[in-house]
Amino acid sequence: MGYSPRYHAASLAAVFLALAIGILIGSEFGGDVVSSTRKSLETSLLGNLSDARGRNEELASELGRSNEFAQAVYPALVRDKLAHRRIGVLALGNLPGDVSSDVEDALGPTGARLVAVGVVREPAALDDLAGALSETRFSDLDTNPDSV
């Protein structure tokens, strides 16, 4: 008992028709699932972003109040605590340009003044330092770790 070409064509057409119907039904229901998941995720992320922005504003406000308090109280707390003192700043490796002016601003109410700013290369060239300090107790910097 053989199959006729007409039966074969009809079965192929039925398979393709079932496949097309399955694709249409799947895309309709699958699209809804993907769409609702996307909307839910978007809503959640927008809520998180809104919460983070609100927290950021709260923290910025707290920081502003803290800075205002510090600026108001600092001069009273340090007034003339370092009167007539000379202050030097020694940095290792690098010193950003605005640090010395920040130090001068901080020293203002204390009565001290910034007289020197220096930067030491890292690592320090100990043999050069020992040579420059040959007439002092630090002449053995390059050989004695305790002197360093």
Image (tube, rainbow, N blue to C red):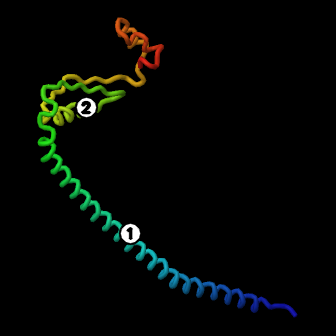
10 Å neighbourhood of mark 2: few (<14), some, or many (≥20)? few
10 Å neighbourhood of mark 1: few (<14), some, or many (≥20)? few
Q: Which residue is mark 1?
A: 45
Q: Position of residue 41 (x, y in %)?
A: 42, 73
Q: Position of residue 17 (x, y in %)?
A: 63, 88
Q: Nearer the viewer, residue 86 or 36?
A: 86
The quadrant in which residue 95 appears is: top left
Instruction: Tell me the quadrant of the picture where the C terminus can be found.
Output: top left
Residue drawn at 40 percent across, 11 percent down: 130
Answer above or below: position of 139 versus 123: above
Q: Position of residue 89 (x, y in %)?
A: 26, 27
| Amino acid bearing label 2 | Gly
Q: Which residue is mark 2?
A: 97
Element on which disc 1 rests: helix
Q: Nearer the viewer, residue 85 or 129?
A: 85
Direction from residue 42 to residue 143 in the image, left or right? right
| Amino acid bearing label 1 | Leu
Instruction: Tell me the quadrant of the picture where the N terminus can be found.
Output: bottom right
